[in-house]
Amino acid sequence: MEALKAVILAAGKGTRMQSDLPKVVHTIDGKCLVDYVIEAAEGAGAEDICLVVGYKHEEVENTISHKDDVTFVLQEQQLGTGHAVKCAKDFLGKEGHTLILFGDAPLITSATLKQLLKHHIQHKNAVTVLSATIDDPTGYGRIIRNESGEFIKSVEHKDANEEELKSHEINSGMYVFNTWELSQALDKIQPNNAQGEYYLPDTLAILKDKGLRVDAFALESPEDINGVNDQKQLESAAEIIRRRKKECTL
């Protein structure tokens, strides 16, 4: 199998946590949120892992358990997910495949990432989005498919029309890319939006316009892609992790 790398986005402050700590170093059962993500990436076969850090980056670098297992890249200004991955461009190289993950999504598992990677390689995709269907998709980017179930595009909630908003399949923000194609597409994304940010999902349209295969792999259960944005979600994630430990599914 071709080489697999992972880039984990962990630069945010996490103001909704109502804490001075960087969000990714909040803990569940004594382990930082981002350590769960690093372990999932390693379990899926990622040989090299890059952590994109920003807010109180020294604290992140000194606190996490797996600091010796990762490369740290500093994102001094938070200018969007595309910008964060651009900061890791030297790490990416040109070969194999690259996972893009979030440091505040501790429920992602190596089993799910292996399924995502298998689908990606079998279908010879340039990029595969990890998606899931949820009851209330308000605020999430939507996956749009045609009548045959083939991927058409991913559209942000605020940019979606009335018909597109009917889709309950959401973009988790996690991907696996052909590394060379990701590197090329990063050079083409522009901050043409109200926030003036570089959005990683813009790479999907760029790759599709090149005639490359872009796809979404839909999870049966959305549990794995749940992020932690506040104390309530932190406790919910903790309950799920403890349940999984009892079930021996971690």
Image (cartoon, grey):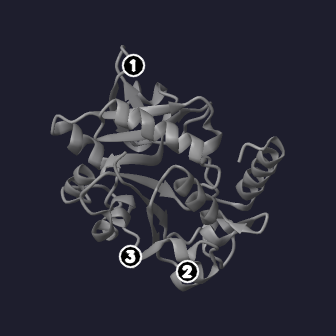
Q: Earlier in the sequence, mark 3 or mark 2?
A: 2
Q: Is residue 82 above or below residue 167?
A: below
Q: Residue at x 56, y 40 (%)?
A: 112
> Quick check: can you spot residue 210?
yes
Q: Secondary structure at mark 1?
A: loop
Front residue of 95 and 14: 95
Q: Is residue 41 above or below residue 224?
A: below
Q: Residue at x 59, y 32 (%)?
A: 134
* Disc 2: CA contacts within 10 A as few (<14), some (14-19) or many (>=20): some
Q: Which residue is mark 3?
A: 77
How many numbered callouts? Answer: 3
User: Given the current orientation, which residue lies at the most extreme top position?
Assistant: 147
Q: Which residue is mark 2?
A: 61
The residue type indicated by label 3 comes to Gln
The residue type indicated by label 1 comes to Gly
Q: Earlier in the sequence, mark 2 or mark 1?
A: 2
Q: Position of residue 62 (x, y in %)?
A: 60, 83
